[in-house]
Amino acid sequence: MERPPVVVIVGHIDHGKSTLLDYIRQTKVTETEIGGITQRVSAYEVKHQEKTITFLDTPGHEAFSQLRARGAKIADLAIVVISAEEGVKAQTLEALTAVTTAGFPYLIAINKIDRPNANVERTKQGLVENNILVEGYGGTIPSLPISAKTGAGVSELLELILLMAEFAELTTEPNAPATGFVLEATRCPKVGVIATLIIKNGRLQTGDFLIVGDIIGRIKRLQNFRGETVAKLEASSPAVVLGLPEMPAPGVPFMSAPDKNTAETLSQSSSEAIVKFPTDKITAGMAFPIILKADNLGSLEALEKEVAKLSTEIVTISIVHRGIGQITENDVKLGAGTPPAVIVGFNIQADRGAIESAEKYAVVIKTFNIIYHLSEWLAEEVLRRAPVVEVEETIGEIRVLKIFSHEKNRQIIGASVNQGYATDRQRVRITRRGAPLGEGEILELKQQKISVKRVETGNQFGALVESKIAIAPGDTLLIFTRGKR
């Protein structure tokens, strides 16, 4: 069954990504006032020519960056926005590299054609100079002149997206359990964890169990991108769910299951989380948000310079707010995000309301009178929060051709090596239509009824695979090794 495309918009910071998204939303989405779980969902659906397109709502969205790093495909298509005034910039090239590395189709939207200094042909020439060949300039990459401000060319842009989606042959199994990716998550004091998902295959329903890495939870409430409570959602739809016991990381794949036993089985056989963070209620993972308060402006500037020195490649200190004067209840509420910020004060104290609220919202407050002591404590926190990273290396990709037998958790399959090589006693990740289903292990390989240790690219073979996942013809098995660093 055909499914709508999921589209991400990338490009230089000032070239009009947000303006384009806003224009499409305002003209293609009927706004409704719904008392939903969340004020705003980070993706939305639009209708054009009676067909649906899903847009990721935040350019450079954190989930997109996470998935890009893991080689997964949250989006099906990308729009690279370039200003017709300024042309190709460094961030433009970074976005193009990210899109081509992710491996999905893209088109160029040459924006701001309404501006007096706009020059579409000069912009295309700039692309050619960077080895990006658009149609009409020796290449096949589609490009369109548009104005996100006036709407000129936007309808044609949506038509081109639908055409590219048609060529991509995007499909879904409508009756299958849902699979997809986490876009973002937050924690609300009143209702608990709220997760925004993108469904890439199957159907998600209220009452289903969600498996996100090691996290399992039952969907208590399901909402669409408008904030309307619904019973089910189909592939390519943004979904807001309530019911997970813990916060999932952006970019992590999810699966659904009809009951708890199935969910627990899938969870045990699938370990998708690459980064594991220390179990601490104030752990910020790779981002360490802090609020800085000081007794005067001079102290505050000195603190900012000192804090800037402490970030590492793995843990980045992010100052989410800065101010002068004592720590107040408002500071605590500001820091009670996800993850919570640590409030650091210099030559000041926290008032009673701040202390009471800090306990309520699990926000840590630390005050110092000596900058050296403050820096020393922050440096220790940065080291403590450094995540344990599991590094995976894919050594082979095999395509399942036939299932010969299936007994309990063991299956005999016929397959061919598409890339790399296959070896016995190696872990495999089972994927179907690009979505991960779980893991297993190759116990034995055979060619011409003879046991072998290794099969090279282009060769067919039989294999005994142990997995709780039922493998099917057409599935892809990624053979990988895993280690820590």
Image (spheres, rainbow, N blue to C red):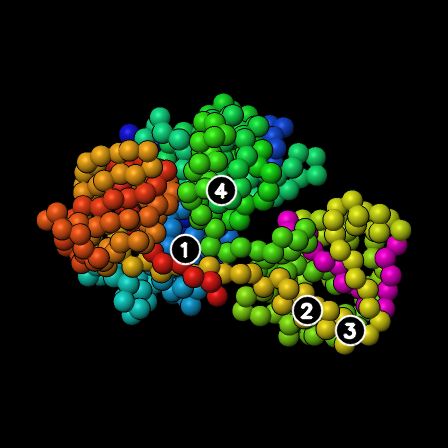
Q: Mark 4 falls on what kind of element?
A: strand
Regarding residue 28, the answer to whether it shows in the image is no
Q: Mark 2 falls on what kind of element?
A: helix
Residue marked by disc 2: 380
Mark closer to the chain start, 1 or 2: 1
Residue marked by disc 4: 212
Magenta stretch, residue numbers:
338-351
- Nearer to us in this view, 145 or 247: 247
Q: Tell me the residue at 55%/25% (across/down).
A: 229
* Residue farthest toward the right in the current orientation of the protein: 352
Give the prevailing secondary structure in the magenta stretch: loop
Disc 1 residue type? Arg
Horizontally, residue 281 falls left or right of residue 451, namely right
Mark closer to the chain start, 4 or 3: 4
Q: Tell me the residue at 18%/46% (across/down).
A: 462
Q: Residues within 10 Å of mark 2 (few under 14, many from 20)?
A: few
Mark closer to the chain start, 2 or 4: 4
Kindly report the distance in space between the C-alpha atoms of the residues bearing marks 1 and 2. 29 Å
Q: Indicate which label's residue lies in the foreground, 1 or 4.
A: 4
Instruction: List x then y, in percent, for residue 354.
Output: 83, 51
Mark closer to the chain start, 1 or 3: 1
Kindly report the distance in space between the C-alpha atoms of the residues bearing marks 4 and 3. 40 Å
Disc 2 residue type? Glu
Kindly report the distance in space between the C-alpha atoms of the residues bearing marks 2 and 4. 31 Å
Q: Are marks 4 and 3 in contact (CB under 8 Å)?
A: no
Kindly report the distance in space between the C-alpha atoms of the residues bearing marks 2 and 3. 11 Å
Say if 444 sits above or below 84 in the image. Answer: above
